[in-house]
Image (cartoon, rainbow, N blue to C red):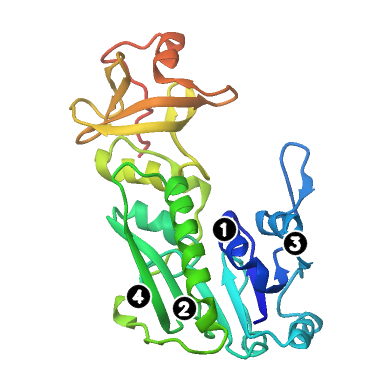
Amino acid sequence: MTVVYFGTGDFAVPALRAVASAVALVVAQPDRPSGRGMTLRPTPVKAAALELGLEVATPESCREEAFVQRVRILRPDVLLVASYGQLMPVRLLEAARCGGINLHGSILPRYRGAAPIQRAIQAGETETGVSLMQMAKGMDTGDIIAIERTPIDPDETAGELFERLAVLAARMALGWLPRLSVGDYPRTPQDEADASLAPKIEPVEGRIRCERDAKPEYDRFRAFTPSPGAYIESVHGRIRLVRARRSEGSGEPGTVLSVAPVLTVACRTGALELHEVRPQGKTGMTGRDFVNGARLAVGSRLVRPETP
């Protein structure tokens, strides 16, 4: 069998490793500048492919005719796709005998789009999964081949769930590949009535607002941890929340309910425990160390009130 593998992010690496022996070409997004020096760095999938000794292509656009022809020449059985980041044209999908097969981190048709894992956590979902899907013209609209479900732990962050789902996706890719490569698999149309979208995460969405209830704000923290990060606008400047938990308690939203054994801040209902924080311009520290440095006391205001 011959596979062309499309992927870019960390989510796609375990599946690539699982099916590497069948992969004739790996396609990833181009290297992008990152870090303080804005040095060009390979994407996680490109780095893994080079480690595995696989040929890699990084077209600016997978719509380029020269690139589509390159894929056609390989005469692949299937295009296997995970966390690639570009919409693939029909003429590219048709370059493989069995088309494109996508590993998507949600229970489709729920959470179609760029950020299904984060959006599911943000919405307070208790279950998610990986969908194996026949790719079509629309975004994540193709027929479902298989779905593997898994519960979401109430304290699980997006980063932790990403890792679990990536491993689940790899198992699915390896288990289904023999059937995918010969076109021997079921196809069930998605129910459009149940469809929802999972748009790209914007950093500004990570702001935690204590004027709201603790439960949805804790879900927001979990959804945006570790990236792009959740934060509060405090009277001491912006503070990123690294580790937090939801707890009981009541008080004026944004005020300190306890300083020991952990820094606890009141929300409209309930409270948030700040176990580890990163004040702007500083390194990470425990909530208790921040209490000592900021000289906080029970009843003092930590979070700036919302401006009208």
Pointer 2 or 1: first along the chain:
1
SS class, disc 2? strand
Q: Amino acid at mark 4?
A: Ala
How many numbered marks are there? 4
Query: Is label 2 or label 4 in front?
Result: 2
Left or right side of 161 for 267: left
- Where residue 254 sits: x, y (%)? 31, 27
Task: Name the residue located 57 percent from the left edge and 84 percent from the top edge.
Answer: 181
Label 2, label 3: how far apart the Cα atoms are: 25 Å
Instruction: Read off the residue under disc 1.
Output: 14
Quarter holding the C terminus is top left
Query: Is label 2 or label 1 in front?
Result: 1
Query: Is label 1 or label 3 in front?
Result: 1
Q: Is residue 301 above or below residue 209?
A: above
Pointer 2 with pointer 3, Cβ within 8 A = no
Q: Residues within 10 Å of mark 2 (few under 14, many from 20)?
A: many
Task: Name the residue located 48 percent from the left edge and 64 percent from the top edge.
Answer: 171
- Where residue 162 sits: x, y (%)? 47, 53
Q: Amino acid at mark 1?
A: Pro
Task: Name the residue located 57 percent from the left edge and 88 percent from the top edge.
Answer: 98
Quarter holding the N terminus is bottom right
Which numbered marker is on residue 143?
none
Instruction: Read off the residue under disc 2.
Output: 133
Pointer 1 or 4: first along the chain:
1
Instruction: Read off the residue under disc 4.
Output: 195
Q: Amino acid at mark 3?
A: Pro
Q: Residues within 10 Å of mark 1 (few under 14, many from 20)?
A: many
Q: Amino acid at mark 2?
A: Met
Instruction: Read off the residue under disc 3.
Output: 30
Q: Residues within 10 Å of mark 4 (few under 14, many from 20)?
A: some
Pointer 1 or 3: first along the chain:
1
